[in-house]
Image (cartoon, rainbow, N blue to C red):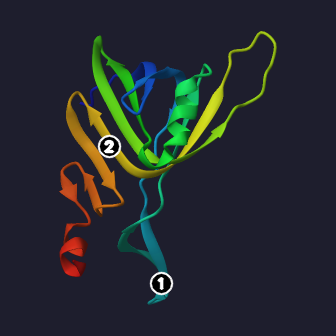
């Protein structure tokens, strides 16, 4: 007999920048899409996709509900900029911490002003480093500079690093 599982909900999100301060409250955080690169082959009467052992570029997006001078400060040192998004994941009466750390170049969309609507500015990040921890356990670590792609503890690029270094 199948059991019904409760869905998880994000209770709230806070965004911090460069370890220097609270950037603001967010109602939306689009995490990077982790996607293997694939090549399509036409063999044996079928088209099949084969993984190449590498990954597509990563991008993510933060929507912040306030203007903060910390964004400009981070842009002025974009080479070292990083963001930490802290959330609370709620399931079946239990709240669990989730933390995403992102480093990379970023663009800032200041949005538009509309009377009686919350301020929203969007930060789009070209990800060079991404780490996702849930309840203190690392689930994903992507580090483009050091050629690391750990997913659930398995480093998909360790053999490649060994072969070419």
Horizontal side, residue 109 vs residue 106: left or right: right
Residue at 36% from the left image edge and 20% from the top image edge = 88
- Residue under pointer 1: 41
Q: Residue 95, located in which quarter of the rendered image? A: top left
- What is the C-alpha distance between the residues marked 1 and 2? 33 Å
Label 2 CA crowd tier, 10 Å (few <14, some 14–19, many 20+)? some
Q: On the picture, is 110 further left or further right than 72?
A: right
Q: Residue at x 36, y 38 (%)?
A: 101
Quadrant location of the C terminus?
bottom left
Camera-side residue of 156 and 24? 24
| Residue 136 seen from this side | yes
Residue ID for mark 2: 131
Rendered residue at 32%/19% (across/down)? 91
Quadrant where the N terminus sits is: top left
Q: Examine the rendered structure and indicate whether residue 98 appears above or below residue 109.
A: above
Q: Position of residue 87 (x, y in %)?
A: 38, 23
Dot 1 lies on which element? strand
Q: Is residue 115 left or right of residue 96?
A: right
Q: Quadrant of residue 120?
A: top right
Left/right of residue 156 with respect to residue 104 in the rendered view: left
Number of residues whose C-alpha sits closer than 10 Å to that of mark 1, classed few (under 14), some (14–19) or many (20 or more): few
Of labels 1 and 2, earlier in sequence is: 1
Q: Nearer the viewer, residue 88 or 62?
A: 62
Image position of 138 with respect to 3: above or below:
below
Mark 1 or mark 2, which is nearer to you? 2
Is residue 7 visible in the rendered image? The answer is no
- The residue shown at (19%, 56%) is 154
Residue farthest to the bottom, as pictured: 44
């Amino acid at each position: 007999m199948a059991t019904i599982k409760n869905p998880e909900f994000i209770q709230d999100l806070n965004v911090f920048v460069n370890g220097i301060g609270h950037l603001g409250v967010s109602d939306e955080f689009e995490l990077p899409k982790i996607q293997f690169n694939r090549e399509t082959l036409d063999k044996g009467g079928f088209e099949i996709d084969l993984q190449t052992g590498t990954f597509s570029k990563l991008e993510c997006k933060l929507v912040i509900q306030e203007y903060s001078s910390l964004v400009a400060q981070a842009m002025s040192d974009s080479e070292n900029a990083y963001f930490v998004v802290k959330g609370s994941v709620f399931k079946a009466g239990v709240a669990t911490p989730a933390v995403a750390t992102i480093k990379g170049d970023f663009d800032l969309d200041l949005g538009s002003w509309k009377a009686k609507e919350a301020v929203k500015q969007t930060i789009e990040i070209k990800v060079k480093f991404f780490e996702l921890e849930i309840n203190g356990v690392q689930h994903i670590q992507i580090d483009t500079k050091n050629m690391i792609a750990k997913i659930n503890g398995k480093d998909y690029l360790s053999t490649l690093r060994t072969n070419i270094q």
